[in-house]
Image: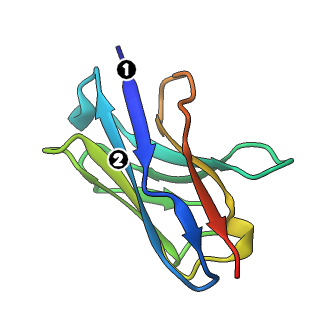
Amino acid sequence: QVQLVESGGGLVQPGGSLRLSCAASGFTFSNTPMSWYRQAPGKERELVASISRTSSRTNYADSVKGRFTISRDNAKNTVYLQMNSLKPEDTAVYYCRRSIFSDSWGQGTQVTVSS
């Protein structure tokens, strides 16, 4: 079965950095575009970033453009989200998901940006 396990979240001060990881299994990862989503308290889940199968193309929400970088390592079946210059409004639970499938949501990983 498809399994996506997010990790790497935590508490960080404004301006700090975190790198999230998503370990994938149960499907052909290298053939699959991947995305990161996030959901803040009281807000809808939103798409943060996406990456194509071979990393030739990436897309970002305007709110994170220039600060976040999505990447993938197909040999390790892992997608990453490098988050720099973090702001309090980045506080959310972050989820990874296959971009073109309606998978169920996993547990996600909590990112809290606070001083």
Residue 43 visible to an observer of this rendering: yes
Pointer 2 and pointer 1: residues touching (CB < 8 Å)? no
Farthest left residue in view? 75
SS assignment at label 1: loop
Which three-letter amino acid code belongs to the residue tagged 1?
Answer: Val
The foreground one among 104 and 13 is 13
Quarter of the image with the N terminus in it:
top left
Label 1, residues with CA under 10 Å away: few <14, some 14-19, many ≥20: few
Farthest top residue in view? 1
- Of the residues tagged 2 and 1, which is closer to the observer? 1
Q: How far across and how far down the image is residue 7, in percent?
A: 43, 49
Residue 52 shows which numbered tag? 2
- The residue wearing badge 1 is 2
Residue 101 shows which numbered tag? none
Farthest bottom residue in view? 15
Asked where in the image residue 25 lies, by quadrant, the reply is top left
Residue depicted at x 65% and y 64%: 112
Taking 77 as reference, is 44 left or right? right
